Image: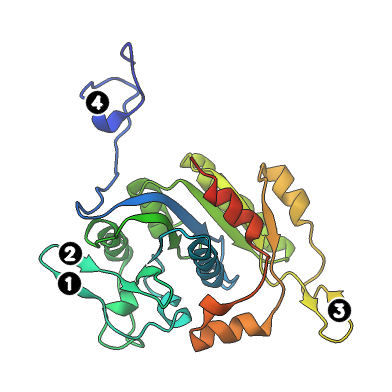
Amino acid sequence: MSGGCNHDCASCSQNCSDRKESFREELNALSSVRKVIGVVSGKGGVGKSIVTSMLAVLSARCGFKTAILDADITGPSIPKAFHIQRRAEASNDGLYPVASATGIEIMSLNLLLPNETDPVVWRGPVIAGAVKQFWTDVIWSDIDYMFIDMPPGTGDVPLTVFQSLPVDGIVIVTTPQELVGMIVEKAVNMAKLMEVPVLGLVENMSYFECPDCGGKHHIFGNSDIEGLAKKLGIDQTARIPINPSLAAACDKGTIELFEGEWLDGIIKTISELE
């Protein structure tokens, strides 16, 4: 390593033994994005997209200019949650995201398809390339916080996002089952490998609260999310109950109207990022 190294290989011309190749993609010249937050899960079906949507809604309610980059290319559900039915438009300068009712800028492959039910039958490298284009070709207007809804697992797309975009932190979504706890550790270990901080751990479908007696019933068994978070060095945790109104809000495209304080601690942590 040469003397006076600032560890920024992208801006260095030296060819030292510690040099790391940068895969970072440049943001569109007309765009501005201050912070990028990935929402990840080790497996599918844990409610990652609804958590992404709720975090974006809370960010917008705090007065921040907010965006969602839907990186779940083969299973995009963000437009439906926000009842966005019109297609994204483009010019010679790039693609324009579609704004939700409250001004959240959204880009998803479903906003580019002729029909929202058209399947995306692409191989991994093509999918990864589409995600990078959502960063390089889309014109994001003065965004304070961009939330990236990632596909599950630790494969091509999550790796592409970590390497190509300046991710400032991630939120991991899980469910109470013990097996998922093991899978959470895989996601945490990937984040450590990519040197990305874990900002929070969200346990979705954590319990069911009886509307009559107010008792909490752990349908999928009791879990120790706080213990798991402590073991993994994660400071913020959140529990979201099995709530039919949340599922209905996503189906009806009214997620921007949801009520609940479950994610307030995590959004506070995100808003305090320097």
Amino acid carrying label 1: it is: Ala
Task: Tell me which label, 3 or 2, sits earlier in the chain.
Answer: 2
Q: Where does label 4 land, which residue?
A: 12
**CA separation, marks 3 and 2?**
51 Å
**CA separation, marks 4 and 3?**
60 Å
Give coordinates of residue 13: x percent, y percent. Answer: 20, 24
- Disc 3 to disc 2: CB gap under 8 Å: no
| Mark 4 vs mark 3: in front | 3
- Disc 2 to disc 1: CB gap under 8 Å: yes
Mark 1 surroundings: few (<14), some (14-19) or many (≥20) residues within 10 A: few
Q: Quadrant of residue 107?
A: bottom left
Point out which mark residue 214 bears: 3
Residue 188 shows up from this direction = no
**CA separation, marks 2 and 4?**
30 Å
Q: Is residue 39 left or right of residue 241?
A: left
Q: Where does label 1 land, which residue?
A: 90
Mark 3 surroundings: few (<14), some (14-19) or many (≥20) residues within 10 A: few
Q: Quadrant of residue 104?
A: bottom left
**Which structural element holds mark 2?**
strand
- Disc 2 to disc 4: CB gap under 8 Å: no
Of all residues, the one furthest to the top in this rendering is 3
Task: Tell me which label, 3 or 1, sits earlier in the chain.
Answer: 1
Q: Where does label 2 land, which residue?
A: 94
Give coordinates of residue 158: x percent, y percent. Answer: 43, 56
Amino acid carrying label 4: it is: Cys
Mark 4 surroundings: few (<14), some (14-19) or many (≥20) residues within 10 A: few
**Which structural element holds mark 1?**
strand
Who's the residue at 54% across and 50% down the image? 270
158 in relation to 61, above or below: above
